[in-house]
Image (tube, rainbow, N blue to C red):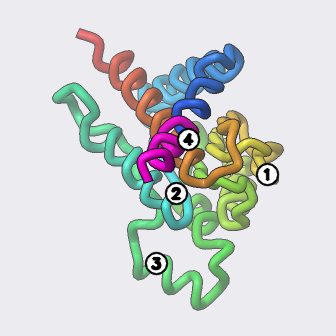
């Protein structure tokens, strides 16, 4: 069992090492940070969506903005779109699970907002539909996926496709990327 534990840790490190050595990935992260800072400065909000473990990660990252990361500072307008279970179950029942996020984007997003979609496969239909509505509303989209990017790669403004096909390694890297973005956005917005 010791060898298996070490193998899992090593796989996680290797995935992150590939990201570390990818200059384009690092530059894209800088650009996303600047875009989000600009959105917050203009009074816009950042929204998150995902399914399963990615929904949990979306909620986690939204809380880093609306709560705090390192600094005691004012709350930033950020929300995970799956937190209203009455809404989710009603729309999934009355319409279709594939439109749960698209309808919320239609109802609450405005031009200049930012929408994160987390999908390890990059093929989650409900996120793709949300990105379609976001484009119509001039909402910037950021996709966090696995290696191929899936269908989301062609639907988002920023694609963070983690160089792995292993769901746990992808999700670990999504949190790392999200934490980097949250830390740097907070740092830029609330510089002392």
Hey, which quadrant is residue 184 in on the image?
Answer: top left
Q: Residues within 10 Å of mark 4 (few under 14, many from 20)?
A: many
Sequence-first tag of 4 and 3:
3
**Which residue carries the number 1 mark?**
150
Q: Which residues are magenta?
A: 1-11
Rounded to the nearest whole Å, what is the CA distance between mark 1 and mark 3? 27 Å
Instruction: Give the mark, 2 or 4, whose residue is nearer the N terminus.
Output: 2
Question: The residue tagged with tag 1: helix, strand or loop?
Answer: helix
Marks 4/3 in contact by CB < 8 Å: the verdict is no
Residue at which label 3 appears: 87
Residue 148 falls inside the magenta stretch: no
Residue placed most toward the observer, 120 or 110: 120
Q: Are marks 2 and 4 in contact (CB under 8 Å)?
A: no
Mark 1 vs 4: CB contact within 8 A = no
Mark 3 lies on a secondary structure that is: helix
Residue positioned 37% across, 50% down in the render:
60
Q: Comparing marks 2 and 3, which lies closer to the viewer? A: 2
Which residue is the site of mark 4? 114
- Identify the mark nearer the N-term, 1 or 2: 2
Disc 1 from disc 2: Cα separation = 15 Å
For label 2, the residue is 54
Q: Which callout, 2 or 4, points to the residue nearer the camera? A: 2
Marks 1 and 4 sit apart, C-alpha to C-alpha, by 20 Å
């Amino acid at each position: 069992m010791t060898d298996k534990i070490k193998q899992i840790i090593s796989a996680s490190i290797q995935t992150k090492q590939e990201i570390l050595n990818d200059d384009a990935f690092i530059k894209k992260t800088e650009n996303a940070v600047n875009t989000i800072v600009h959105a917050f400065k203009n009074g816009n909000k950042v929204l998150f969506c995902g399914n399963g473990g990615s929904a949990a990660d979306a909620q986690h990252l939204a809380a880093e903005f609306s709560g705090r990361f390192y600094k005691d500072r004012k709350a930033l307008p950020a929300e995970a779109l799956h937190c209203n279970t009455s809404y989710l179950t009603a729309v999934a029942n009355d319409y279709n699970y594939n439109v749960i996020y698209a309808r919320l984007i239609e109802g609450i997003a405005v031009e200049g907002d930012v929408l994160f979609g987390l999908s390890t496969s990059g093929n989650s239909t409900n996120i793709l539909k949300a990105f379609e509505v976001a484009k119509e509303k001039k909402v910037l989209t950021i996709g966090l996926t696995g290696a191929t990017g899936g269908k989301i790669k062609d639907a988002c403004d920023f694609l963070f496709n983690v160089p792995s096909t292993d769901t746990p390694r992808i999700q670990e890297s999504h949190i790392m990327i999200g934490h980097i973005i949250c830390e740097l956005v907070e740092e830029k917005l609330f510089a002392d």
